[in-house]
Amino acid sequence: MKKGIIGIKLGMTQLFLEDGTCIPVTVVQAGPCVVTQKKTVSSDGYDSVQVGFESIAASTVTKPKLGHCAKTGQGAFRYLKELKFDERPELNLGDVLTVEQFEPGDFVDVSGTSIGKGFQGVIKRYNFRGGRASHGSRFHRAPGSIGASATPSRVFKNKKMPGQLGNEQVTIQRLQIVRVETADNLLMIKGAIPGHRNNVVLIKNSVKA
């Protein structure tokens, strides 16, 4: 990995290109992020940096976190995330990451928490077909049989069953950056990204670019 930043999803809109093409984009307020910790192969077994995003009052964080962030000399941060690099990064404690590292046309991977939809059945959760809708069927949205009888006399692990839908870590790969507005720290990314409005997301250069 060579590029990375933390941001907040502001919502979706659309942009018109010079040829009149309309592109749906997600607006992300990304950075500035401060390097709060640097890990190396010699000390931690791999190369990475930890970055902080969104400054908060020192009275609202725990003493360990405050002491951890104090090394940067820029106060405490609400969000801390780690960016792992393929090679030793040329970043030091206290360095600031902004949207200037990205350019229109870059491809990125965006990770965030998907919208939680609560407890759902197998039709909504896994797109099961369901039973007949005809009169007298008595089988419409049920999951059906979940196991055999004598053999193997149990239900296999990871069987698709009703349960919690959403509210999990999701990464969407190879999304293209359409516009970068450095004055307002905004990234406009083509298409949709995980989560609701004001959701915190991690943006990294794409592994499939």
Image (cartoon, grey):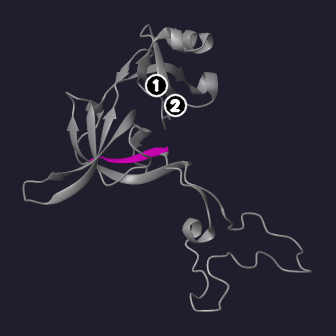
Q: For the residue marked with disc 2, what is the amino acid?
A: Glu
Q: Is 43 part of what is drawn in magenta?
A: no
Q: Quadrant of residue 3?
A: top left
- Say whether residue 174 is left or right of residue 183: right
Residue 85: x and y in percent read 48, 35
| Residue 152 pos. (x, y %) | 88, 76
- Tell me which segment is drawn in magenta: 106-112
Question: Which residue carries the number 2 mark?
Answer: 82
Q: Is residue 21 something one can see in this rendering?
A: yes
Crowd tier of the residue under label 2, counting other residues whose Cα lies within 10 Å: few below 14, some 14–19, many 20 or above: some
Expressed as whole percent of the image width and height from the top left, the position of residue 55 reads 41, 18
Residue at horizontal 21%, vertical 56%?
23
Sequence-wise, the earlier of marks 1 and 2 is 1
Q: Nearer the viewer, residue 106 or 193?
A: 193
Residue for point 52% across, 14% down: 60
Q: Residue tagged by mark 1? A: 51
Secondary structure type for disc 2:
strand
